[in-house]
Amino acid sequence: MLDVEPYLPQLRAALAEDVGPGDVTGELLVPADARANARIVAKAAGVLAGFEIAAAVFSCALEDARAAAAADGRETSWVDAYINMPDGTRLAPGDQVLKRSGNARALLRAERTALNFLMQLSGIATLTARFVAAVDGTGAKILDTRKTTPGWRAFEKYAVTVGGGHNHRFALFDEVLVKENHLVFGADLKEALAARPPGMPAIVEAETLEEFHTAMAADCDVVLLDDFTPEEVTAARRARGNAKRPLLEVSGGINLDNVRAYAEAGAERISVGALTHSAPALDLSCEITPVA
């Protein structure tokens, strides 16, 4: 379960982006003290991710409604939450995902922001689960990349883990990952890796088998085989022999049709940018019903 407390300012900012100075439609059509139920329902099969985030969005809007009511001397909005399904639940069409009760205007203000988070993150978890299923039994791990929506990285990488995948480095600070754009400056690779902070993993990208041998000689932890064919991955695995290191990771052009071939060729790690940059949102809807 994701601890949303550190992200509440971000969630409030997302609400503020959508509401601005006020929900003009809701204020025209919905009485200030009207009460309602909001139900988010699955319209497609998938893996749920982001429940706590969506629930927190509703909570922020309802808290603001209570504070506004109290400031005006009106009865404060009641709140009743029903948690039906934790993240990681396999959803079927018609499943109720979340229910929130309280001030109707607040629920309407929160509806779209909560759905945007929940649909996008559930889509990532769903796609990740499909990749994980595709390599089942091979021992290969499915990893994400830094190809995330700016500002959403923690959420999106969390959704990958909900789908059964693993996180690559979070950002530039927590792993060394040497790519072609670093090597063009002429640094000695082996010397550079020897100078890295103690205990920090080092990954070196290779685009050819020759570069793979150079990376192995530099004593890295992982060689990232970029745009290799499955046959080339097998050749790299043979070249490594009985050694346990470096681990072999593949990236570039990986999809659901070929991912198992890469796993069976000997890749121990498979990084897939599409998990976060191309996952289709899971179809969910929010139903608002008045409460007398």
Image (cartoon, rainbow, N blue to C red):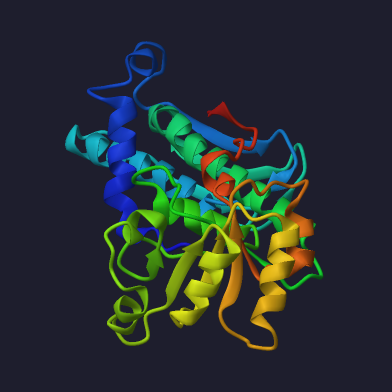
Q: What residue is rendered at 35% in x and 11% in y?
A: 28
Image height of 253 relative to 110, above or below = below
Question: As drawn, is 260 to the left or to the right of 271?
Answer: right
Which residue occupies the extreme left position in the image?
Answer: 71
User: Residue 198: horizontal and vertical position, in percent?
Assistant: 32, 87
Could you tell me if residue 71 is visible in this image? yes
Label total for image: 0
Q: What residue is rendered at 37% in x and 27% in y?
A: 33
Image height of 14 relative to 145, above or below = above
User: Residue 266: horizontal and vertical position, in percent?
Assistant: 73, 70
User: Residue 111: horizontal and vertical position, in percent?
Assistant: 47, 32
User: Residue 223: horizontal and vertical position, in percent?
Assistant: 53, 70
| Figure quadrant of residue 15 | top left
Along the line of sight, the residue nearer the viewer: 150 or 262: 262
Q: What residue is rendered at 24% in x and 41% in y?
A: 67
| Figure quadrant of residue 240 | bottom right
Along the line of sight, the residue nearer the viewer: 70 or 266: 266
Could you tell me if residue 75 is visible in this image? no
Which residue occupies the extreme front position in the image?
Answer: 210
Image height of 93 relative to 135, above or below = above
Q: What residue is rendered at 34% in x and 61% in y?
A: 183
| Figure quadrant of residue 77 | top left
